[in-house]
Image (spheres, rainbow, N blue to C red):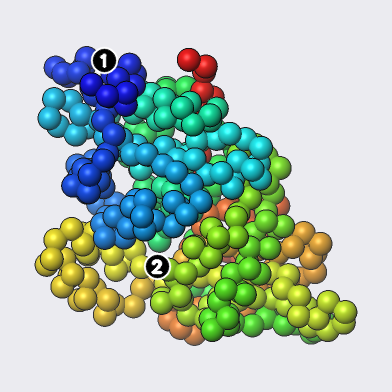
Amino acid sequence: MNHAELSGQSGGGKAHGGEVVVRPVRTRRERRRFLTFPWEIYRNDPLWIPPLIPERMKVTNPNKGVFFERGTAAFFSAYRDTRMVGTICAACDPAAIEQTGRKDCMFGFFETTDDAVVAAALFAAAERWARDHGLTALVGPYNLDYEDGYGILTDGRDRPPVILCGHTPEYYQRIVEEAGFVPARAGNIALAVDLTRPDPRVERIFRAAEIAQKRARFVVRGARLQQWEDEAMRVHHLLNHSLDRSEEGGVPWPEEAVRDLVRPFLKIADPDLVLFADVAAGPLAGRTVGWFAAVPNMNEILTSANGLRYPWDYLSLLVALRRHPKCLAAKSLLVLPEYHMSGVAALLFGEFYRRAREKGYAWIDLSLTSEKNPETPVIAERAGAVRYKRYQVYRREILSA
C-alpha cells in the first residue's frame, strides 16, 4: 500500500459497512472519473451547472493546465469498497506564498457524500501532501484558480450560479466546519440588478453619472481586445491596488494568473461591456483608474450541455448557443482608492447599465465581492442591487506530525 493510501486511511475509518481509502489520481482514466464524480453528488439538484469535462481535463493536466506553469498539485479520490465517495485536490502556489508570506495549501475540487468520515479522509490526504511540501494550512475551496469554484455556498439556493461561481450542497458547510475549518476571511457575496423595470435607485445612479461626466475628468471606453495583454496588465494593477488584501486570507494576483483569467473570455466578451475609466487630461492623462467588466452568463447555455461528457452533448450545446443569455455576469468593479470619491464608480455603473439595457439583457449579476469591500456593495445596493448568494472560504491550520 502506498503512502497516499495510508494517509487516506489514517483520516478515515469504518462507516456504512466499509472502510474509506483515499488513493492518488495517476492515470488519465482515473482523472476523468475524478472529474465526473460530481454527477453523483448533484444528480437531483436542478440548480447545479455541470462543468465542461474537456476544459476540466485540460485544467487538471500537469502538461497543459495553466496553474502548473507556476505551481504543483495532486488529486485524490476516496473509495468505500469499489464505490467512489469523494474527491479533493491539494495545490501549492509559490507565487501566492511569496507575496503573502503564508505557506498555504490550496484545496479544491472538493466533493463528498454526506459523511464526515469521507470528508475526514479527504482532508487527511490533502494535509499529508501539504505537510510533505512544507505547507502549514489548508485554505479553500478553489479549483486551481482563485476565481473558479470559490468557497462553500452558505446562502442563496433559489437560483443557479452564474459563470465562474460555484454551487455546493447545503451539508458542505456543516461538514467543513465540523472538520475544524474556520472562515479564512469575510464572506463573498453575489448581487443582482433587475433591468426590466424602472427603479428610482438606478435613475439616481444615472444622474450621478451625468454629474461626473460633466466634470470631464474621466473618459469611459470599451476594451481594446487587439491589445488584450496590455489591458490585462491594467486589470492586474487595479486588482492588486483596489482590493483590500490586508485581512487574513487575501491573496495578491500574479501577473500570469490575470492573463490566464482573461484569455478564455476573449471569444465571448463584448468589448462594449468591458469598460475602463481613464483620466481624461493633465499630467496623468490616460491613466486607468477604474474597470467594470461583464461577460454573457454562459451558464444559461451550459446547463443544456451536460458537461460535454458524451458526443451527443455537443449537439445540445450547438442548439443552446442560439439563445441569447438573459444575464450579464459582471465580475468586478475596481476603482483605485484615491478615486473613491471622484464619481468614477457612478460613471462606470451608469454607462454599463445603459449599454446592458440597449443590448437586451434582463439582469446583471455582480459577483463576487467581499462583504468588506469598501465600495462595491454599497454602490450596487444604492443602484438597486439585492444580495442573492454568499460564499465562504475556509482555513484549517495543519498540526505537526
Please name the amino acid that badge 1 sits on.
Gly
Residue at (40% x, 67% y) in the render: 297
Residue at (83% x, 77% y) in the render: 284
- One can see residue 388 in this view: no
Q: Dot 2: within a 10 Å radius of its alpha carbon, few (fewer than 14), some, or many (20 or more) residues?
A: many
The spot of residue 25 in percent (x, y) is: 27, 39
Residue at (12% x, 30% y) in the render: 82
Q: Nearer the viewer, mark 2 or mark 1?
A: 1
Please name the amino acid that badge 2 sits on.
Asn
- One can see residue 399 in this view: yes
Left or right of residue 45: residue 246: right
Residue at (14% x, 17% y) in the render: 17
The spot of residue 302 in percent (x, y) is: 28, 64
Residue toward you, 145 or 171: 145
Res 101 quadrant in image: top right
Residue toward you, 10 or 276: 10
**Element under disc 1:** loop
The spot of residue 279 in percent (x, y) is: 78, 78
Q: Dot 1: within a 10 Å radius of its alpha carbon, few (fewer than 14), some, or many (20 or more) residues?
A: some
Residue toward you, 256 or 166: 256
Left or right of residue 27: residue 363: right
The spot of residue 102 in percent (x, y) is: 62, 35
Q: Is residue 371 above or below residue 367?
A: above
**Element under disc 2:** loop
Q: Which comes before the other along the chain, label 2 or label 1?
A: 1
Which disc number belongs to residue 297? 2
Which disc number belongs to residue 264? none
Mark 1, residue position: 13
Say whether marks 2 and 1 touch (CB < 8 Å). Answer: no
Task: Kindly report the distance in space between the C-alpha atoms of the residues bearing marks 2 and 1.
Answer: 42 Å
Report the quarter where the N terminus lies. top left
